[in-house]
Image: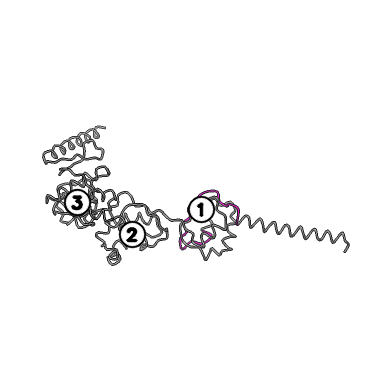
Amino acid sequence: MSKKAKISLCIFFLGVLAAVGGFVAGRYVSDNKSPNFSKDYVLYVYPEMTAAEVLDSLDAGAGTLRPRSLARCFRKLDAENGMKPGRYVIGPSATSIYVARMLVFGWQTPQALTLSGTIRSKGTLAKKISLQMMADSASVAAALEDEAFLSGYGFTPDNVFAMILPDTYEMWWTASVEDIFDRFKKEYDAFWTQGRVAKAEKQGLSRLEVSVMASIVSGETLKAAEYPVIAGVYLNRLRRGMKLQADPTVCYCHDYKLDRVLRKHLEIDSPYNTYKYAGLPPAPINVPPKACVDAVLNPDEHGYIYFCASPDFDGTHRFAVTYGEHCRNAREFQRELTARRRAKGKK
């Protein structure tokens, strides 16, 4: 072989090596260094999901820029057999290898479990939890009725609402039902400080009784400013030995199916019917907000015994010390209600 041919052959091999090196380096940069997504995305990986389904989800949700790079990294780390279920936050700056490692090593981002709004049934509570966590509603509902399970937390299926404090809790999306209830109990114990326990004792109530009273207050109004006033009303009645006569407890007895509480509804025989039985009901009738619990512990001090809806129809109430004053307030409300109904009928 001539010298010129040898030189040409060497140049050719050097070119091939350079091309291969460039190809390998390009892949390395593509897989390990270059961002591969166009949008922020929260990926939920369920136990039964395949790698192909996850890749499709990322492509649609995160806008994968180089699908082959991501698929290659999935194969490299055997994501098909090694993915961990969880909630993963993918950002535009993430590389293919980082996302693959994230799923294989289970680098989850905590989920915010928020309990808010009106929670008057175990079904509603179970649904709120299952919509935000991997745990299904049937499992949560079963736990809420499991006497042996709840006894470990010091509660029963009847009074478990007292343990649940509406708030936002950060935890792993994959948390088990037991993990979720462990967190509820931990937050319950943290909430009931020595100071709050002392305030409950000052009101002559146990922690459970405070929650029961708070659930009634919660059922009466959506106006947080009125919580301490209404709490004061019911504490005044309780101390005088009066029946609480709280409409929300009657609604509870009728599974919250009443549009209005009528005289006939007051006859239902239930320990939760505060028109028939004196004292507090045996357990909370809903999951009361923390603000309602604190209102019972820090009630307004006043002489009010009665209250009724305001004729302003703004969700507030008018309060009264005497029954006569209460009757005047009630008549004023009824007149306004009648007038509004007539005006509506004319339209």
Looking at numbered disc 3 in the image, what kind of residue is underneath it? Val
Tell which circle, 3 or 1, labels the residue nearer the N-terminal end.
1
Return the x and y of residue 103 as percentages of the image width and height.
51, 60
> Are there few (<14), some (14-19), or many (20+) residues within 10 Å of tag 2?
few
Tell which circle, 2 or 3, labels the residue nearer the N-terminal end.
2
Q: Report the Cα–Cα distance between label 3 and label 1.
A: 49 Å
The residue to which callout 1 is attached is 90
Return the x and y of residue 105 as percentages of the image width and height.
51, 62
Q: Which mark is residue 186?
A: 2
- 283 within the magenta span: no
Return the x and y of residue 108 as percentages of the image width and height.
47, 58
State which quarter of the image contains the C terminus: top left
Residue closest to the eye, 107 or 131:
107
SS at mark 1? strand
Return the x and y of residue 273 as percentages of the image width and height.
17, 53
The residue to which callout 3 is attached is 250
Looking at numbered disc 1 in the image, what kind of residue is underneath it? Ile
Please name the residue shown 37% across and 57% down the image: 130
Q: Residue furthest right?
A: 2
What's drawn in magenta, residue-wise?
A: 32-53
Looking at numbered disc 2 in the image, what kind of residue is underneath it? Lys
Q: Report the Cα–Cα distance between label 2 and label 3.
A: 32 Å
